[in-house]
Amino acid sequence: MRADARAKRDQIVTAALAQIGTRPNSEITLEGIAADADVGIATLYRHFPTRAALYDACAIVFLERIESLLDDALDGFEDNPTEHFESFVWALVESGVGILATALAADSSDDGLGARRDAFMSKVQLLIDAAAPHGIIAPGQSPMQLATELVVATRPLAAPLADILPDVRDRLVRHLMAGWRTTA
């Protein structure tokens, strides 16, 4: 792929990730993504013939980004387990975890997305296994449960509700983390 075409593709993915992380699904349009990426709709379709293809590309980029956050959480975890675990969860939330829904639903044969997801989830399991003995999360929780709960709790709200309850996402995440804890 030529450098200018690659740059446009990257602009589209960046714009899509920004919209997915900040807007409800009903407000996300391919035309809006193209406009935010400063490309025409034909350019978007040339790179991503379907919404699913675009979302798959976004999910791969998102997984690559958050894998470094996960590595940071695992590195030195035993020094301060609660801080490392909660920092990772909040970093996920701030990164716009909604795109994980695409990764969670991916078929293992989908252009490497399923394999990337599985590798990432294996690392999340390491974090869960490290956190469980400290009572940070109940033993037996799966990465899929954690990710699904975060996706559901953090999906952006439509304007009227978002205006009325601007802190609802953060409150729900705090409730989730409290619910994950066990008495050690």
Image (cartoon, grey):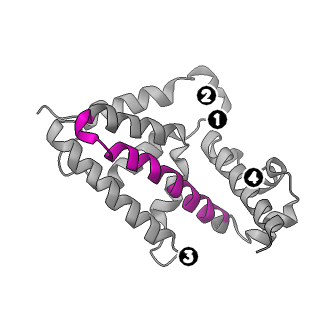
Toward the top, the furthest residue is 164
Q: Tell me the distance, in whole angstroms, between the alpha carbons under discs 4 and 3.
A: 23 Å
The residue closer to the viewer here, 28 or 128, is 128
Segment tinted magenta in the rendering:
54-81
Q: Is residue 59 above or below residue 152?
A: below
Q: Amino acid at mark 4?
A: Thr
- SS type, badge 4: loop
Q: Could you say which disc has been placed on residue 81 in the image?
A: none
Sequence order check: which comes first, mark 1 or mark 3? 3
Q: Could you say which disc has been placed on residue 162 in the image?
A: 2
Query: Percent x, y for residue 62?
Result: 55, 54
Count of numbered labels shown in the rendering: 4
Q: Amino acid at mark 3?
A: Asp
Q: Tell me the distance, in whole angstroms, between the alpha carbons under discs 2 and 1.
A: 6 Å
Bin the neighbour count of mark 3 within 10 Å (Cα to Cα): few under 14, some 14-19, many 20 and up: some
In the rendered image, is residue 142 in sight? Answer: no
- Residue receiving disc 1: 158
- Residue receiving disc 4: 29
- Residue receiving disc 3: 111
Camera-near label (4 vs 3) is 3
User: Any magenta on residue 59?
Assistant: yes
In the rendered image, is residue 154 in sight? Answer: yes
